[in-house]
Amino acid sequence: MRLKSWQEIPWGGLIVEAGNAVEYNTGDWRSFRPVRDKERCTNCLLCWVYCPDSSIIVKDDKVVDIDYMHCKGCGICAEECPVKCIEMKPEAEFRKEGR
Amino acid sequence: MDTLVTQKVKGLTGNDAGAEAMRQINPDVVAAYPITPQTELMHAFAAYVAGGKVNTEFVTVESEHSAMSATIGASVAGARAMTATSSQGLALMWEVVYIAASLRLPIVMVVVNRALSAPINIHCDHSDSMGCRDSGWIQLYAENAQEVYDNIIQAVRIAEHPEIRLPVMVCMDGFIISHSLENVKIIDDKAVKEFVGEYKPPWSLLDTSHPVTVGPLDLQDYYFEHKRQQAEAMLKVPSVVKQVGEEFGEKFGRSYSFFDTYKLDDAEVGVLALGSTAGTIRVVIDDLRKEGIKIGLLKLRMFRPFPVRELADAVKHLRVLGVMDRCISFGAQGGPVFMEVRSALCDLAEKPITRSYIYGLGGRDITKEELQSLGRELNKLTKEEAQKEIVKYFGVRGDD
């Protein structure tokens, strides 16, 4: 995303488009990444209920993905999963840069 | 003086004059907490609210931090919002004072200047408002009750100007102006109403059909750009202050700009001051001129933004310039006004000899006789002497 100049943005940090947080990558703060074992998942959707960042993506009553652009790695999904099919793995294992 | 609008002369204190201006402006919201010497201003305004003379929602809060917070909340909701404070009250407001400017809210706040603790002191100096000179607020200083009244009315127009949208502090000397009774020309209610106009906020938090987010997180990627915008807004202030001051003059017979001068054009020696001391200096200048000293005054009205070029132009012909600060900037070379003036003169090929005078702290009186001796001292001041003693504490026991 091209960053805008001071002449191009609303004054005082005002955000004029509602709901534009969806465009902001907050997932890069994450130090642990939730990884779901699809085989053991029962699709009870408790992770979807508990996720504070709406990062569990559900389609047709089934968990289909995790939104890593917005998941901050809090681990609530892994904690609440009744069959313990979500594992919190160090983010470093997935990132090559900076190591 | 011929004016287009009828004006009644009333005997008012600075605080009463401030409350009178606020009554005529009739702001949507005023949130305030009492503190000496501002108390009487809000006391008088609260009486207008209680008596139904204004439509203002008056919010009595539990602290100055809350006063400014509530004023910000009202402004964000699209209201014309005002408050007033002094000294420790302004100090307690500190973090939200910055937020008002950073969110670009056109709030007008009367600051009745008072010394800062410790030791505790209720009397006048400019430490409180000078302390927030980097907060992003516009600052206007008044010489007397008339200017308090006139400045408050103009401040509304300056703050709300669509190219600016910055808060304005209207400063008056505690007790010396706030509690002294003077003749003040009061403009007709209707004319003030027309002059300030109706406030039309460009956005409002209560406008649910155009939702906005105010004051969100702003990190390494955009914070700097927002600060740059504020710096730019400050650059646009002088032309608006001038335009509003001229329009005020055309309508009501009293014009305003960044500063006012008295016998400065042909002067060799200049004194620069703000607030009520400027009034005393006018009298002293007449006395000293009789002694043959070619002395003049520059009274600064707008300290923020600082009128760099205009001020340098106005004083560059002087041989000597004494700059009066009713405030200490601890550890700095001279008072806040002095530092700005020196910086403004820095690039001139030929510039006056300057000296910083720190005076009147904690309400210490400054008399005609003292100012006469200051004028005589400046008249004899050599470059060598000035360099040897750049800062003088004037009127304190223990120094000459």
Image (cartoon, coloured by chain):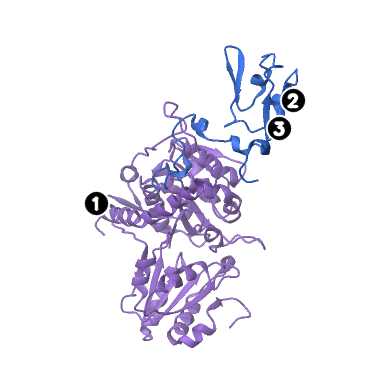
Chain colours: A blue, B purple
* Circle on res. A89: 3
| Of the two numbered discs 3 and 2 in the rendering, the one whose residue sits closer to the viewer | 3
Q: Amino acid at mark 1?
A: Leu
Q: Amino acid at mark 3?
A: Lys
The alpha-carbon separation of the residues under discs 1 and 3 comes to: 78 Å
Residue positioned 45% across, 84% down in the render: B376
The alpha-carbon separation of the residues under discs 3 and 2 comes to: 13 Å
Q: Where residue B325 sits in the image (x, y, percent)?
A: 51, 69
Image quadrant for the N terminus of chain B? Answer: bottom left
In the figure, residue B88 lies in which quadrant?
bottom right
| Of the two numbered discs 2 and 1 in the rendering, the one whose residue sits closer to the viewer | 2
- Label 3 SS: strand
Circle 1 is placed at which residue position? B4
- Label 2 SS: helix
Mark 3 vs 2, N-terminal side = 2
Q: Amino acid at mark 2?
A: Glu
Circle 2 is placed at which residue position? A79
Residue positioned 70% across, 29% down in the render: A75
